[in-house]
Amino acid sequence: MLASSIDFARIEAVLHEASTAAAQHTLPLFRTPLAIDNKLAAGFDPVTEADKGAETVIRDIIAQAFPDHQIIGEEWGTTGEGPHSWIIDPVDGTRAFISGAPVWGTLIGFAIDGVAVAGLMSQPFIGEEFIAVPGRSTYRRGDLMRTNQTSGQTDLAAARVFTTTPNLFSGEHWSKWQAVEQATRLQRFGMDCYGYALLAAGQADLVIEPYLNTYDIAALVPIIREAGGAITCWDGTEPSGGGNVVAAATPKLLDKALELINRA
């Protein structure tokens, strides 16, 4: 299925409409006492009314606009099938959300044949939006709008690196994180989807995380690529479906990071 056959102005309009509707569910609940459910029998994977309500309204808007498209969501699973799919994480960074930290975001991606080609990350408390369609990655905050552009960094030793937490790199992956930490200038933690958005905006140079699901990353793939960045799984495969992922400001920096990761 060719991307050229898609009306991306309509895709973008639906992304905006869905994120606006989601914010009406998430913002009133942010920094308020919330009932928190745990999706794991062992460990902690929180979910709240904000996650569930936001995904419901996002799904409804997409289904009305594109009833023949597949929808994949973190909270309510998969409906439909076919080459066109929408991938939703209504609150990426639920731990940040329940801690009152505004680094969570609503993620909505649009994929063709499993490759994300349009996407949105909205942080409604700050009022920031990062959105991409083919040929363009854009930052918006109120009346401010500018093109996203990565830093252009190619020097691994000078790189600023984000990951959610080093604790994700358990077992065989621990040596990979240690290698990245030792080879780079600065490391920051706890950013969730916001770290990838900052990479697209030129404020970070590398993001590396293992064990991502498709709804964690699909929306962010086109935001980074259309800003001049590069993103892949550690084994070089397409990251839109999730996996162990590394994103970089430039293809050259990505190659250096992959060599380091796969050697460790």
Image (cartoon, grey):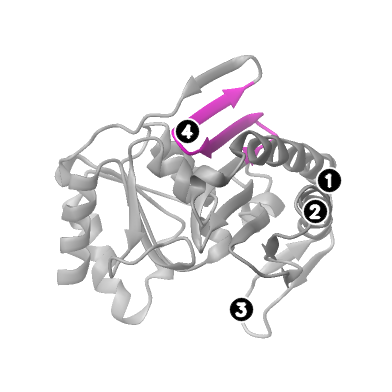
- C-alpha separation, residue under disc 1 versus residue under disc 4: 26 Å
Residue tagged 1: 25
Q: Amino acid at mark 2?
A: Ala
Which range of residues does the magenta coloring cover? 122-141
- Of all residues, the one furthest to the bottom in this rendering is 41
Q: Is residue 31 visible?
A: no
Q: Residue 190: horizontal and vertical position, in percent?
A: 49, 52
At 74% from the left and 65% from the top, the residue drawn is 47
Instruction: Point out which mark residue 36 bears.
Output: none
Q: Tags 1 and 2 in contact by the CB under 8 Å rule? A: yes
Instruction: Point out which mark residue 137 bears.
Output: 4
Question: Does the stretch in magenta take in 139?
Answer: yes
Residue tagged 3: 43
Q: Amino acid at mark 4?
A: Ser
Q: Residue 23 vs residue 129: left or right?
A: right
**Mark 3 vs mark 1: in front:** 1
Quick one: SS at disc 4?
strand
Q: Residue 203: horizontal and vertical position, in percent?
A: 38, 33
Q: Residue 19: horizontal and vertical position, in percent?
A: 72, 41
- C-alpha separation, residue under disc 1 versus residue under disc 2: 6 Å
Q: Residue 30 vs residue 136: left or right?
A: right
- C-alpha separation, residue under disc 4 versus residue under disc 3: 36 Å
At 61% from the left and 54% from the top, the residue drawn is 93
Q: Amino acid at mark 1?
A: His
**Magenta part mainly helix, strand or loop?**
strand
**Mark 4 vs mark 3: in front:** 4
Query: N-terminal of the two: label 1 or label 2?
Result: 1
Q: Residue 186: horizontal and vertical position, in percent?
A: 28, 44
Give above or below for 161 relative to 83.
above
Quick one: SS at disc 2?
helix
**Mark 2 vs mark 3: in front:** 2
